[in-house]
Amino acid sequence: MGRGLSGLQKDILRLAQDSQGIRVRDLLEKLWGWPAQPWKDGQVFDKATIGAQEYNRGHATLSRTIERLRQRSLIRIFKDVTRYGTMISLTSAGIEAAQGLRKNFR
């Protein structure tokens, strides 16, 4: 790892460790504070309520961040059959990194 982890990357590792893996929709709820709605027309979040620009920015930022964690071999990405649900879990290197964050946090 040439550079350190960003604050968002650290938050994702901590949340994934706490829950033995985490859905992307849960990350958006917890990190962005977006209110989830019951599954409606393939959408978990109401773009109109959040605002189209913020909605797009949040998804793009999270997508890039997750991909960077994957490239560093810290997470695995799983998609369900419909390709709408995405979940991440930590690799062994990700678990070590998350545990290191906990030690440095205390």
Image: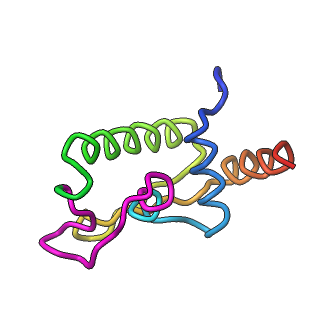
Q: Residue at x 69, y 47 (%)?
A: 93
Left or right of residue 30, residue 13 in this image: right
Which residue is more in the foreground, 80 or 37?
A: 37
Q: Is residue 30 left or right of residue 46?
A: right
Could you say which quadrant of the image residue 41 lies in?
Answer: bottom left
Q: Is residue 44 inside the magenta stretch?
A: yes
Q: Residue at x 26, y 71 (%)?
A: 81
Q: Up-down: is 46 above or below 55?
A: below
> Outermost residue, bottom direction?
38
Instruction: Tell which of 68 and 10 is nearer to you.
Output: 10
Look at the picture and state if 66 lies above or below 20. above
Location of residue 38 in the rendering, given as x and y in whole percent from the top left corner: 26, 79
Chief secondary structure of the magenta portion: loop
Task: Tell me, yes or no, whether the highlighted magenta stretch contains residue 32.
Answer: yes
Work out whether residue 59 or residue 87 is closer to the camera in this orientation and state it: 59
Q: Which residues are magenta?
A: 28-47
Q: Residue at x 61, y 59 (%)?
A: 15
User: What is the quadrant of residue 9 in the picture?
Assistant: top right
Q: Is residue 17 left or right of residue 76?
A: right
Asked if residue 17 is positioned above or below residue 40 in the image, the reply reads: above
Residue appearing at x 61%, y 69% in the figure: 19
Outermost left residue: 41
The residue closer to the viewer here, 21 or 40, is 40
Quarter where residue 16 is shown: bottom right
